Amino acid sequence: IALNIRATNEYRNTHILAYCANRFIRPTIVQFFSNKGISLNQDQYALSEMLQWIWRSRIREGKDIKIYIPSKRMRELLITYLQPNSEKKL
């Protein structure tokens, strides 16, 4: 499914996922906010995008899923998020 899909129930029974993206904020958006003295957190953005995408699956019904994340960065962001006592904060 598309990375930017939102508000759909079409994939609610999906249990095997592959997140094959390494997300970053578009440079023009980063530059726009930077010019106004606002810094954006690339990791928070990437994690929130991935979580929104994962949420389209059956995990929102409390059911197990299997997910393949080939990008080391994205995989580590999710693992860190899922570890409540992790010292690395986004």
Image (cartoon, grey):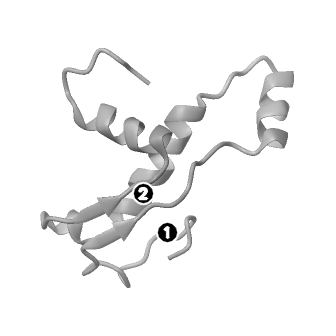
Spatial CA distance of label 1 from label 2 is 8 Å
Q: Residue at x 72, y 21 (%)?
A: 38
Q: Residue at x 42, y 57 (%)?
A: 52
**Residue 20: % across, % down:** 51, 61
The residue type indicated by label 1 comes to: Arg
Q: Is residue 41 left or right of residue 34?
A: left
Q: Residue at x 50, y 76 (%)?
A: 1
Which of the pair 6/83 is nearer the observer?
A: 83
Q: Secondary structure at mark 2?
A: helix
Name the residue at the bottom extreme: 10
Where 42 sits versus 34, above or below?
A: below
Q: Is residue 26 left or right of residue 1?
A: right
Where 1 sits versus 42, above or below?
A: below
The residue type indicated by label 2 comes to: Gln
Q: Residue at x 59, y 28 (%)?
A: 41
- Quarter of the figure with the C terminus: top left
Disc on res. 52 = 2
- Residue 80's quadrant in the figure? top left
Where 75 sits versus 7, above or below?
A: above
- How many neighbours does mark 1 have within 10 angstroms: few (below 14), some (14-19), or many (20 or more)? few
**Residue 77: % across, % down:** 41, 36
Q: Is residue 72 visible?
A: yes
**Residue 78: % across, % down:** 35, 41
Where 86 sits versus 47, above or below?
A: above
Q: Earlier in the sequence, mark 1 or mark 2?
A: 1
Which of the pair 21/40 is nearer the observer?
A: 21
Q: Which residue is mark 1?
A: 6
Q: Secondary structure at mark 1?
A: loop
Disc on res. 39 = none
Q: Is residue 56 visible?
A: no
- How many neighbours does mark 2 have within 10 angstroms: few (below 14), some (14-19), or many (20 or more)? some
Q: Are marks 1 and 2 in contact (CB under 8 Å)?
A: yes
